[in-house]
C-alpha cells in the first residue's frame, strides 16, 4: 500500500509571538446584507469562480418595473441597505443628512480623490433581477435573486456586472437593429457569465456571452417544485425597507458616536 505523502506547515516563527488560543481568536465579521427581506436571503445568488449559465426571468405582473430594477444602497461597516429613494420619490437616508452636515461643518472628513480614507456616505448604484441557474446536468435551480453593481463606468474602471448584463441584452447589430431578446418567455436564451478572479486583482472580472439556442421558460419551470415557483414575486416586493432608527444604527458603525449624536440633534 502506498503511503500518502503529508506535508506539515512550519509556523514556528509565528508561534513564538502568538499565544492566542483558538477559542480566544476573533470571530470573522458577519456581513449584514439588508438589501433583501430576510425571507429572501436564501435566494440571493453570488457568482462563484468559473462559468454560470443563467435564464433571466421577465418582469412579473403587475410590476411597473422591467426585468431588472434600479436601486442604490448605503454601505456601513459590516453591511448595506436600500436607499429610501427607491421606496419614495425624493426619499433621504440619514447618511444623506450626515453627508450634508459634514460638508458644511467638516468637509475634510468626507471621502474624496484627495482624501481616500474619508467617510463614504453616498449610496452606490445597484440593480436586481430574478434568474434560473442552469446546472451542468438536470433541471435548473430554484429561482434566484441577483443583486449586482450597476455602475456605468463613467468615472473610470470597468462597469458593474449589472450594467454589463443590461448592455448585452440590449445590444444592436451593424444596422442598429436589436439582436434577439434573451429575456423573452419563449424565444429567450441562456446567458453565460464567467467569473475570473486574479490573485493580484481586488475585484473579479466577468465575461458575458449569449447562448445560441432558445430556452423557453415553460419547459425550465416545469422542473421546479410549486414551493419554489411560489417564491417568485415582483422585485419591488422582495426589497427590505429599513426604518429611520435602523438607519441611525447603521450610521453609528461609520461615524464616531458623539458625531452621530451631534448630527442627529441638528437635523431633528
Image (tube, rainbow, N blue to C red):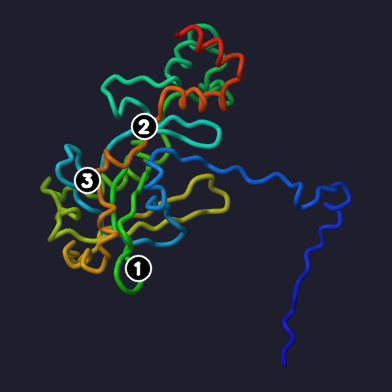
Kindly report the distance in space between the C-alpha atoms of the residues bearing marks 1 and 3: 22 Å
Percent of width and height locating residue 52? 37, 61
Q: Earlier in the sequence, mark 3 or mark 2?
A: 3
Classify mark 3: helix, strand or loop: loop
Q: Which residue is mark 2?
A: 241
Residue matched to label 1: 135
Q: Nearer the N terminus, badge 2 or badge 1?
A: 1
How far apart, in angstroms, are the residues tagged by discs 2 and 1? 33 Å
Residue in view at x 41 percent, y 52 percent: 42
| Horizontal side, residue 252 vs residue 124: left or right | right
Give the mark nearer the N terminus: 1 vs 3: 3
User: In which quadrant of the rendered image does the N terminus lie?
Assistant: bottom right
Rendering quarter of residue 69:
top left
Q: Position of residue 70 (x, y in %)?
A: 29, 36
User: With respect to residue 40, does 97 lie above or below?
Assistant: above
Taking the spot 41% from the left edge, 43% from the top edge, the residue there is 38
Amino acid at each position: 500500500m502506498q503511503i500518502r505523502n503529508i506535508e506539515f506547515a512550519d509556523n514556528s516563527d509565528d508561534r513564538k509571538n502568538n499565544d492566542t488560543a483558538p477559542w480566544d481568536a476573533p470571530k470573522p465579521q458577519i456581513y449584514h446584507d439588508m438589501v433583501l427581506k430576510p425571507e429572501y436571503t436564501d435566494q440571493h445568488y453570488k457568482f462563484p469562480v468559473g462559468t454560470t449559465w443563467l435564464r433571466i426571468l421577465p418582469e412579473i405582473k403587475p410590476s411597473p418595473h422591467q426585468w431588472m430594477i434600479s436601486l442604490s444602497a448605503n454601505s456601513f461597516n459590516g453591511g448595506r441597505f436600500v436607499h429610501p429613494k427607491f421606496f419614495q420619490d425624493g426619499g433621504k437616508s440619514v447618511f444623506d443628512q450626515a453627508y450634508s452636515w459634514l460638508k458644511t461643518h467638516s468637509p475634510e472628513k468626507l471621502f474624496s480623490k484627495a482624501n481616500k480614507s474619508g467617510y463614504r456616505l453616498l449610496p452606490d448604484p445597484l440593480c436586481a433581477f430574478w434568474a434560473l441557474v442552469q446546472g451542468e446536468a438536470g433541471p435548473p435551480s430554484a429561482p434566484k435573486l441577483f443583486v449586482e453593481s450597476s455602475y456605468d463606468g463613467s468615472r473610470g474602471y470597468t462597469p458593474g456586472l449589472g450594467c454589463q448584463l443590461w448592455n448585452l441584452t440590449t445590444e444592436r447589430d451593424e444596422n442598429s437593429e436589436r439582436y434577439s431578446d434573451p429575456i423573452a418567455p419563449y424565444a429567450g436564451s441562456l446567458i453565460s457569465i464567467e467569473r475570473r478572479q486574479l490573485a493580484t486583482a481586488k475585484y473579479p472580472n466577468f465575461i458575458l456571452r449569449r447562448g445560441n439556442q432558445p430556452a423557453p421558460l415553460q419547459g425550465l419551470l416545469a422542473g421546479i417544485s410549486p414551493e419554489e415557483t411560489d417564491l417568485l414575486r415582483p422585485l419591488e416586493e422582495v426589497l427590505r425597507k429599513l426604518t429611520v432608527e435602523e438607519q441611525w444604527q447603521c450610521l453609528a458603525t461609520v461615524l464616531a458616536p458623539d458625531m452621530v449624536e451631534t448630527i442627529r440633534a441638528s437635523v431633528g
